């Protein structure tokens, strides 16, 4: 093999690795920032809950209102909610594994009791 070609291939490989590492570092930084924002939001909710509890108000009601505001903001940006398809049961209504009826083709029965069947 040509030594120049090998050197170029190794340099290209090193550059690709460096580029991928930089991209991974950027993703990690974005994730850390997102986690920081979530922690800050949780802290704010706890403070609001504590303050409302100190005032004698229902702190759970305030928490629900805050969550609804967050959800309503998220739902307006999303698309139309999808409706669930009609779900039907996997088996018919008459299926009961304990009764032995309507179970299909399997019908196992235990053998006769006793040491011998001869006479």
Image (tube, rainbow, N blue to C red):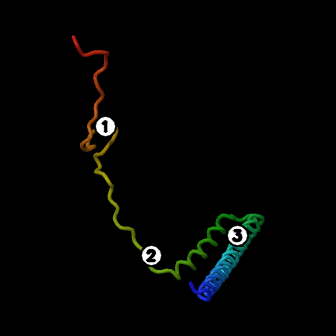
Q: Quadrant of residue 20?
A: bottom right
Residue 81 is labelled as 2
Crowd around label 1: few <14 · some 14–19 · many ≥20 (10 Å): few
Against 28, residue 99 (above or below) is above
Front position in the image: 86 or 10 = 10
Which residue carries the number 3 mark? 42
User: Compared to 95, does 31 lie above or below?
Assistant: below
The location of residue 42, given as percent across then percent down, is 70, 69
Report how far apart the C-alphas of labels 1 and 3 lie in the structure. 52 Å
Observer-nearest of 39 and 3:
3
Q: Residue 14 sits in which quadrant?
A: bottom right
**Precedes in sequence: disc 1 or disc 3:** 3
Viewer-closest of 55 and 86: 86
The quadrant where residue 96 appears? top left
Residue drawn at 75 percent across, 69 percent down: 47
| Mark 1 lies on residue | 99
State which quarter of the image contains the N terminus.
bottom right
Horizontal side of 13 relative to 83 (left or right) equals right
């Amino acid at each position: 093999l040509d030594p120049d070609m090998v050197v170029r291939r190794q340099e290209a490989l090193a550059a690709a690795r460096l580029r991928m590492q930089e991209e991974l570092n950027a993703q990690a930084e974005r994730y850390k920032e997102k986690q920081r924002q979530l922690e800050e939001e949780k802290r704010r909710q706890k403070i609001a809950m504590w303050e409302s509890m100190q005032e004698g108000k229902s702190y759970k009601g305030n928490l629900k209102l805050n969550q609804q505001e967050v959800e309503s903001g998220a739902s307006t940006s999303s698309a139309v909610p999808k409706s669930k398809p009609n779900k039907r049961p996997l088996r018919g209504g008459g299926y009961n594994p304990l009764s032995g009826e309507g179970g299909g083709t399997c019908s196992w029965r235990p053998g006769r009791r006793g040491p011998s069947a001869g006479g």
